[in-house]
Image: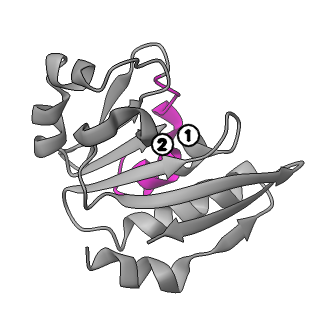
Amino acid sequence: MSVGVSLEGMLPRETASAEETRSLGARLSAVLPAGAVVALVGDLGAGKTHLVKGLVDGLGGAGDEVSSPTFTIAQEYEADGDLILHVDAYRVDDPREFVEMGLEDSMDAARLVAIEWPEKMGSALPPDAVRVEITHLGGDRRRIRYLP
């Protein structure tokens, strides 16, 4: 996907607070094309949801409304009339669950899809997904990098 070239100029970055991680998400949203799927790789507590808050902010939505969809698997947000889909695959045992839930249709309709724990999606993860890794460095520090 051509978006990789743009992200390579923005990432890797280190952030020193949840607010900086969120701000980076807002800046990233400006270079992501419509329909982008962002696969967020990182351990529990790495800051994936804070990055999603920034993505929603950057697209004109209310990032403060974003919360981890761990128990609901997917949450939808609106940003300037567009759909943003936030998926947390942590509790998914079989990638076929995404098909059964109809998430593919929502993904097709969304301006942006952010997926936490994308490795659980198997072949349901689009091959052109933009992979971003967030590593917790201790305290409030995070390293965020693009995975080509």
CA distance for labels 2 and 1:
10 Å
In terms of secondary structure, where does tag 1 sit?
helix
Q: Residue furthest right?
A: 139
How is the rendered protein coloured? one colour
Crowdedness near tag 1: few (<14), some (14–19) or many (≥20) residues, C-alpha within 10 Å? many
Comparing 40 with 28, the one in front is 40
Q: Is residue 106 located in the magenta-colored stretch of the structure?
A: no
**Residue 112 visible somewhere in the drawing:** yes
Q: Which residue is mark 2?
A: 63
Q: Which residues are magenta?
A: 52-69
Residue drawn at (34%, 35%) of the image: 121
Which quadrant does the N terminus fall into? bottom left
Q: Residue at x 44, y 54 (%)?
A: 55
Residue at coordinates 46% horizontally, 23% vertically from top-left? 69
Which of the 4 image quarters holds residue 84?
top left
The spot of residue 104 in percent (x, y) is 15, 34
Circle nearer the N terminus (2, 1)? 1
Asked if residue 117 is positioned above or below residue 12 in the image, the reply reads above
* Residue 66 highlighted magenta (yes or no): yes
**Residue 70, horizontal then vertical, whole percent:** 50, 20
Image position, residue 97 (x, y; %): 25, 18
Residue 16 horizontal/vertical position (percent):
80, 60
List the residue tagged with mark 1: 49
User: Can you name the residue that lies furthest to the top here?
Assistant: 71
* SS type, badge 2: helix
Residue 85 appears in the figure: no
Amino acid marked by disc 2: Gly
